[in-house]
Structures are given as structure tokens and as C-alpha cells.
Image: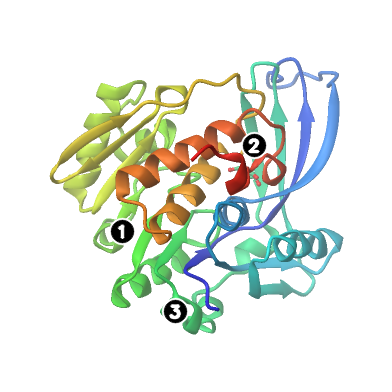
Amino acid sequence: MSAKVVVVGSLNMDLVARTQRLPRPGETLAGDSFFTVPGGKGANQAVAVARLGARVAMVGNVGDDAYGHQLRKALEHEGIDCQAVGVCPGVSSGVALIMVDAASQNSIVIIPGGNGQLTPASVQRYDALLQAAEVIICQLEVPMTTVAWTLARGRELGKTVILNPAPATGPLPSDWFADIDYLTPNESEAEALTGLPVTDIDSARRAGERLLQLGAGKVIVTLGAQGALFLSPAGSRHFPAPVVKPVDTTAAGDTFIGGFAAGLVRGLEEGEAIAFGQRAAALSVTRVGAQPSIPYLAELAP
Ligand code: RIB
């Protein structure tokens, strides 16, 4: 059976250090623990889709190293279609150096490795996957040319196109907006995309309205504990977040996106799919690590 969701994006091995607080520049700190877990925004989102009940294919690259082998195995273990996960000879796999403090805040440095070699041609080779899908998801941890190509192809095929603009360092190219059905920034990404400060629901609304003006179909600004703000040309709606005690917020956004997409292809109405994604993300922040923190459908109350 073909995948209803295709994720075009990154796979990283996450090297995670837990510390009481994040170090200042030039400072050496003794941390509390260290572990490695599969991550990468693309792979995390694919895992979330799979665990939350929808068939998904991953399009991406790993390096020809031990991490690459582990990253691919982790996705295969979830039943994800990995035919389009390529191996780049002579290149390392993507790696994310992650520090998480006692307040569950994280800071992340990414080394792209194989993710940086995902070309438009390498996605085009798997056009049959895009053609068979209902939803296509991209993020910004692979080359911009590849994201641009995938968004445009998704639009051409009439698919539901989701762009999670993460990590965002500035405005998106203006010709991307017409190809995006759902743009899903968090606070800092919404700020980077618009230049407007985003700290609460009202400021998220201003940024979201700006992104609609720029041409995005619909916008979902995720605000952590402050919930999510959905905006469309018809109006906006705030979705409060379930109250949980956070342990590690890594991959919470990815879990939300995967849950939202899985909800859509499983036939949930848009608002129900947002709430479903939020419930999954809330559970993920009570657990440590990226992919290990992502819940399964059976764990979510109906
Ligand atoms: O969104 C969380 C992810 O960001 C981590 O798994 C890390 O790999 C980085 O890509």
C-alpha cells in the first residue's frame, strides 16, 4: 500500500548532553548525562506520522557511516518506506549537538552531512511517491533548492503541502508562499520569517496575518505552553495546549506536525487534526530525546 504522507527532509543522529543550565560563550560546564538517539526534523516528523497511524515515506540522505545505518534502521523499524533514503559515499551522516538544561530548554547545533546533499534530482527520482501521497511535508534542514522544488512539485500535483520552516534564519523566498497550504512556524521562526516580535497569542496573530498576506494558504504558529494559533483568510482560532510537566521539548514541534498530518490523512477535520497533534506533542515533552519521545496512537486518549 502506498504512503499517504511523504516527508522530504533531514535525518540526524542527536548527541544529547543534559546539563543544569546551558553554558555561556567560552564557559566549560560539567554536564549530568549523555546519550545518542535518532533525530532530524524530517525523520522525527516521519516517525510521528507512522506512530500516529498513517503510512509514510521518507525522502532524504544519510552518510556512509555507522550513524547512517542506525538512522535508516530506526525508520524501517517504524514501518516507514525508506526506498528514497539514499547513502552519500564519503560523507558523514547529519549530526545534531543538543544541550538540554534543567528547565527543559534546549540549544542545538546541526552539521548537515548527507542532508546537505539532497538535491532536487534526488527527490525527483522518487516522483512516484509524491504522486501517490496526499500530504507532502518539508522543513529547512536540507538545501533550499530542494525544498523549493518539492513545494512546487507538490502544488503542481495538487497535494496538501506543509512547510515547517525550521530552522528559520530569515524571510522565505517570496515565490514559495503560493505553494504552501500550511506554514507551521514556532514563535522564533515566525519572528525570523516576518521580522515581527512573537511572544504571545496577539503577537503571533500579527505575524501569522503577515504570512497570510505574503501568500501562505494557512498558518499555524506553535507557541509551546501557550498553545497554537491557527490562521486562514477566514479568520483565526487559538488552540490551548494540554498542561504537562515538560522534561525535554526536543522534537515537540516535529511530533505536532506529524500528528497533524496523520490526523488529516486519517480523515480528521482541520481543527481536530491540530488538537490531535497538540496532544501528541504534549506527551512527547514529558519524555527525553527526539524519536524516543514520540508517542504511539494507542497512548493518546480518544
Ligand atoms: O526538531 C528537533 C530536531 O532538530 C532534533 O532531533 C535535531 O536532530 C534537530 O534536527
Foreground residue among 128 and 269:
269
**In this rendering, the label closer to the viewer, 3 or 2:** 3
Residue that lies at the very extreme toward the front in this rendered image: 302
Q: Position of residue 194 (x, y in %)?
A: 29, 38
Name the amino acid type tagged 2: Ile
| Helix, strand or loop under label 2 | strand
Q: Give the residue displayed 37% in from the left and 26% down from the top.
A: 240
Whether disc 2's CB lies below 8 Å from ligand 1 is answered yes
Q: Are marks 2 and 1 in contact (CB under 8 Å)?
A: no
Whether disc 1's CB lies below 8 Å from ligand 1 is answered no
Name the amino acid type tagged 1: Ile
Foreground residue among 243 and 23:
243
Query: In the image, 32: left or right of 56?
Result: right
| First reached walking from the N terminus: tag 3 or tag 1 | 3
Q: Which disc, if any, is residue 180?
A: 1
Q: Position of residue 84 (x, y in %)?
A: 62, 76
Q: CA distance from mark 2 to mark 1?
A: 26 Å
Foreground residue among 63 and 134:
134
Q: Say whether residue 184 is visible.
A: no
Instruction: Tell me the quarter of the image containing the N terminus.
Output: bottom right
Q: Which disc, if any, is residue 108?
A: 2
How crowded pointer 3 is (Cα within 10 Å; few <14, some 14-19, many 20+) is rated as some
Q: Is residue 166 above or below residue 94?
A: above
Name the amino acid type tagged 3: Ala
Q: Give the residue displayed 65% in from the left and 55% down from the top.
A: 112
Return the residue at label 3.
132
| First reached walking from the N terminus: tag 2 or tag 1 | 2
Image quarter for residue 34?
A: top right
| First reached walking from the N terminus: tag 3 or tag 2 | 2
Q: Say whether residue 255 is visible.
A: yes
